[in-house]
Image: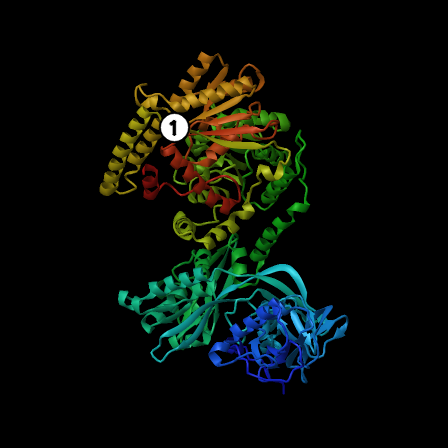
Amino acid sequence: MPQEFDPSILSRLKPVAAPRQRDGGIHRLTFRIRMQESSGRPLLSVDHIPADNALSDSDRRVISEMRRVSGASGSGFDIGWGGDSVSVADIWENQYLLRMLGPNDKLLGPDGLDVEWSDDMAVPSLLLGATDGGDEITPRLEFEAAGVRLASPVFLAEDLVIDGHVIYRTAPVGDNFPNIGALVKSFPRRLIEPYLSLFLSYFSNITPVYGNHPAVYTDSVEKAVPTIILEKVASDQALYLRVVQTLDSTSEELVPGVTLTRAVTVTDDGHMIVRGVENIDIDRYVADLEEMILRSSPDRAARKDVFREGNFFIIPAETASPFLINHLQEILQKFRLLGSEKLKEYKVTPAFPKLKLRLSSGIDFLEGDAEVEVGGDTFSLADLLEQFKRRRYIQLSDGNRAIVDEKYIGRLQRIFNNRDRQGHVRVSFFDLPEVEELINSKVNGKFAERARDVFEGFNRLKSLQPDGIKVNATLRQYQKDGVVWLEYLTRNNLGGCLADDMGLGKTLQTIALLTSLYPVAEAPTLVVMPRSLLFNWEQELARFAPQLSVATYYGPDRDLAKCLGSQVVLTTYAVARNDIEQLKDIKFECAILDESQNIKNVASQTAQAVMLLDARHRFALSGTPMENNLTEIYSLFRFLNPTMFGTLENFNATYTYPIQKNGDSEALQSLRRRIYPFLLRRVKKEVLTELPDRIEQTIYVEMSESQKKLYESRRLAFRQEIENAIRSQGVAKAQFVMFQALNELRRIASVPESMSDGRVASPKIDELMDSLASAVGNGHKCVVFFNYIAGLEIVGQRLDQLGIDFESMTGSTSAAQRKKIVGRFQSDPKCMVLLMTLKVGGVGLNLTAADTVYIFEPWWNKAAEEQAVNRLHRIGQKATVNAFSIITVGTIEEKIQQLQQQKTELFNQLISSDTASTKSLTEEDIDFILS
C-alpha cells in the first residue's frame, strides 16, 4: 500500500546537517557531489587537494567559502594538503557554491566519475497514475532530456538536476524545490483538485499529466475566498477560530489557509484546467471580524478578554454565543466557514428557510396562507417574522437556535407586507416574479399563468415592430422599440413611464402610439403638461399626425364639452387640478402626463387630482422620473399602476427608509426589479452615436473682499439661527429658516448686488461677460440659465452696453411670447444670446441653434441642469456643445456641487441613467453646507 501524502510535513521539514565523510581521492584537486543517505540531500565536498598543487584564486575562493559555511573553525575541521577531505556544504542551502565551480574538470558525480554538463534541457512532468482499485492517485516526477527519460534525477538547484554524473539545466521550478519529495506522495482521488492547486502554487514549469492529458493553462482567474476555520470549542465554551483565504475547491483536509497562486479544475474526462488566483486583502476581513466580535461583547471587561494574535482569535463564551447569534448569517455571506459542526456546542445552526404557499386565484390577486419551514419545523409567516424581529433567530423544537438570512427575511417582509389580521397573504400581479423566484417554482392558477405570460412577453418585444402607426416621420430603431413597448403595455392594460433622456423624441413616440389607437378608439385621450409645452404639443401633433383631431383645454374661456369631441385633448397641470371635479367623471382612452415629475409630491393637490382621472391606459413621460427622493417613484406608479405598492406607509417602510437611511442594496434591487418592466429609459450616448460631443467645464471665480465679508457675516449668523431653531423646534419645523439661509447665501455668492443695494458687485458676472463676449465674437450662439431674475437683469443690461443682440424670458413670459422668442433665437443670425431662468428653460424647448450654454448658479438637483443643457444637446444639433458651470469659490456653491455628485448615485442604481436624485436635505446636509 503506497504511503498516503501527509501535508503537515511541509511545516515540519528542517535543514539537515551535513555529515562528515572521508573518501580516498585521485591526486588532483577535486570536488564531489554526494547524496546524504538519510535524506537524499545533495552535499558538496572537497574531495582531494594535492600537496604540490598551486591553487588558483578561484579555487581558493570556493574552498574558503566552503570552510565558512561549514563552520569548520568551530568543529575542529581542517582542509588538508595532499590528503582526503570531507563533505562540507549542503548544496540546496548553498547553491551558489556549485555555480562558482561551474562546468570544469574538477567536479565528480556521486559515482566518482567526472561530471558532464549537458546542453540538453531536462523537462519535468508530474505523472498522476491511479493505484489498484482507483481510489488513490500516485504522483511520479519524471524528467526527459532529448526525448530520453532520466533514470534517477536529483535536484541540485531550482534550475539544475543531476542524473548519475550528468548535470542538466531545467526551467526554474521555484525556491520550494527541496520540498518536492514531500508532496510527491499518494493521496485520495477525491483530493486531486486541491492537491494540484497546491502543487502548482508551490512549483513552476512542471506540467501535470493525468490519464495522458497534460494540464491546460488559461488566462482566467479565480478569486480567493475569505475563510473562517472554527478550530475548537474549549471546555469553558471559549471559541477558537482562525481567518485564512482558500479557494472554493480547497479541502479542509489539505492544508487549509495556504496562500495559493493556481486553481485547478479536473473535468469528468480527466482534463485539467489551470487558472490564476486573485488573492484578497485578508487583513481587512480580519479587522471586520474583530469588529463583529467586539460589538457582541456584553461589556468592556468582556471585550478585553477577547484574544487576538494575527488572524487567530480566542473568544470567551459570554461573547461567543451572542457573536454567533447576531452575526452568523453575516459571516456566511462574507466568509467560507470550515468546522461548522462545532456550532452545535452553542445550540446554534445556520438555517435556510423554505417558503410554502397555499394560494387561490382572485380577480386581481392571489390570496391564501404562507408558511415557512426552518430546520424541520414549520412556522406561520407571522410567527417567523415576529420571532426574528424579537430575537434575531428562530427557536427550533430541538432546542437549537436557527440563524436565518436577514436579507431573506427582508424579502418576505417586502413581498408579504399586505397581510390581514389572520395572517392571510395577498399576492398581486406585480409581486409574482419575486414570489416565484423566492419559492424557486411556479405558482399555479389562471391568474398566475396570465401574469407570467405578460412578464415573459417583455423579453419578446425586441423581435416585434410597431403595429399600425401612421406618423409623418422616419422613426429610429430605438423609437420603434419604444412604440412597441407602449403598445404592449396598452394591450395588457398596464401603465408605464417613457423615461428616455432629453431630446430622444418621447413626444414623437407617444404620438405614434396614439395613431395606432385611433380612429378605432372612441374615447378621447387627455395629455397633461406644463403650460410651456402646450404650443410644442400642438406643433408636434400637427406635424407628425395631422389626421388626429386635437383640442386645447386651457384659458379662461375653455369649453370641456367642446374639447371632448376631439381625439386628443391637451391641458395643463394647473387646469387639471382646478377642474378635476369635471374631468374625473369622464372616461378617457389614455391619460398621459408629460414632464410627470410635476406629480412627484404624492400629497400635493396636483398629484391627488390626476390620481382621480379615469382612463383605460395611463402613461407618463419624463427624462427625470425621480428628482429628489424615492417617494416620487411611489407617486408616479401610484398613478400608472395603483395596485403596485399599496399605501405610502408600506412603501416607505419597505423601500424608502431601508434604501435611503440604511443603504439596503437588497431593497434597492427589489424595487428596481419591480419597476423595471414599466419604465423604459434610453440615454443619448447609447442610441445617438452621431450626436456631437458635449464638453463640460467649470469656471471658478474668487470672491471680492467686500463680497467675502458680506458672505461670511451672514453664514455665521444663519448657522447660529438654524442651530437655535433645530434645538427649539426640531428639524422639520426649522425648514423655513434653513431655506431662507440657503437662498440668501446663494444670492450673495452669485449676485451680491441684490443683497447689498448694489454696493457689492459680482465678480461672477464680470467673468460671465468676458466669456460671453469672447464666444459671441467667435460666432457662437449662447444660452445662459439663471436661478435669480436679478442676475438675468444685470447681464441683460451689460449686453445692451456691449451692443450684443439678445432675448430673455422668465416665468412671467406668456406661452405665446416664449414661442416668438425661441423662434427668433433659432432663426435670426443677429440674436446671439438667450437669457432665461432655469425652470422656464428646463422643458419643451429646442435650442439647437446655440452651441454654448452657461449655468450661472448651480442648482440642488443636477437633473434640472441636465434638462437645461439638453435643450441644446439633442437631435438636430450639429456642433460640439460647450457647457459651463460658474462656481464662486469658498461658498455654498462649492458645497452644492459636491452634493450634486452624491445625488446621482441612487438614481443611477435604480433607473440606470445619467440623471440625479437624493433624499431631502437632512440636518447633516445643512451642517455640511454651512460649514
Image coordinates for residue 708, horizontal then vertical, percent:
32, 28
Q: Amino acid at mark 1?
A: Glu
Residue at numbered disc 1: 702
| 16 to 467, vertically: above or below | below
**Residue at the location (63% across, 39% down)?**
478
**Quadrant location, the C terminus:** top left
Asked whether, in this view, residue 689 is left or right of residue 726, the answer is right
Give the camera-side residue of 923 and 14: 14
Given residues 563 and 314, the one toward you in this image is: 314
Instruction: From the viewer's side, name the closer residue of 845 and 125.
Output: 125
When asked about the image quadrant of residue 850, the answer is: top right
Q: Is residue 475 above or below residue 322?
A: above
User: Quick check: can you spot residue 556?
Assistant: no
Rendered location of residue 517, percent (x, y): 62, 37
Question: Along the horizontal axis of the image, is 768 left or right of 277?
Answer: left
Identify the residue at the far front of this view. Answer: 52
Q: Residue at x 36, y 40 (%)?
A: 921
As drawn, 807 above or below 17: above
Q: Secondary structure at mark 1?
A: loop
Instruction: Tell me where residue 450 sits by quadrant.
Output: bottom right
Q: Residue furthest right?
A: 147
What is the quadrant of residue 138 in the picture?
bottom right
| Residue 788 percent location from the top left of the image | 39, 25
From the top left corner, tell me how far across and down residue 204 is, in percent.
62, 66
